[in-house]
Amino acid sequence: MDEYEGDPPGWTGAPFPRWTNSLARLGLVLLAIAIAGPPALSWLWVRSPLATYEYARVAQPVNFDHRHHVRDDGIDCRYCHYDASRSSTATVPETELCMGCHGQIWTDSPLLEPVRASYYEHTPIHWRRVNVLPDFVYFRHDIHVRKGVGCEDCHGRVDLMSNVYAAAPLQMGWCLDCHRNPEPHLRPPELVTVMGYRSNEPRGELGARLRRELSVNPPVYCTACHR
């Protein structure tokens, strides 16, 4: 019988080499990523500007510059979007409204050729929607305007935009944040269209006072927006 000379070099008594422990840990990490990764990526995706189209420039059939009309000419938002304070929608103006001014000024401008063609041919201009809500979301512009929520709170500083873009994600969490704490977003209703609004009194005090005076009590239950 051969004499026993001890364990071979590197033998630890374990059935597998030590590096298999690291391999097992790596496998568990990869498994956790495989399970949790897709839901996490989906959650991040739907909240990213890639999905909400926040800040995305939308090409329009007419190169309408809000900076010129709002900032330079001082046209009130509700002159064109005249239903914003009395209806659920803000209204896209008809060509006849545009030609009320441009039948007298810039009458030969090449930029306005699509507007003139629409007017004389009685065909509407197909504007592309910038702020999009799902069909299952119920929203009214008029109640927000009458309660003193400024246009720029949702639409941003359109007086500084050449092409209007979505300035807010318009997702449920974003809306609920305002409904739960509306005071910072309130102003006198007659000033809702003022861009760059600044109050002479502290915004918190103003918001608290307007909330009482205007009976602002935004709903946070599901059926308020999902009907």
Image: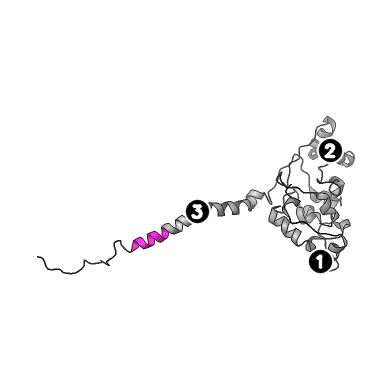
Q: Separation of disc 3 and disc 2 at Cα?
A: 54 Å
**Which amino acid does the dot numbered 2 rest on?**
Thr
Pointers 1 and 2 in contact (C-beta within 8 Å): no
Name the one closer to the observer, 109 or 223: 223
Residue occupying image coordinates x 89% and y 56% = 190
Which one is earlier in the sequence, the residue at label 1 or at label 3?
3
How far separated are the C-alphas under marks 1 and 3?
46 Å
Across and down, in percent, residue 129 comes to 73, 43
**Nearer to us: label 1 or label 2:** 1
The amino acid on which the numbered mark 3 sits, given as a three-letter code, is Ile
In the rendered image, which residue does mark 3 sit on?
Answer: 35
Seen at 66% across and 50% down, the residue is: 52
* Residue 23 part of the magenta-drawn span: yes
**What type is the residue that disc 1 sits on?**
Arg
Q: Which residue is mark 1?
A: 203
Q: Residue at x 64, y 49 (%)?
A: 51
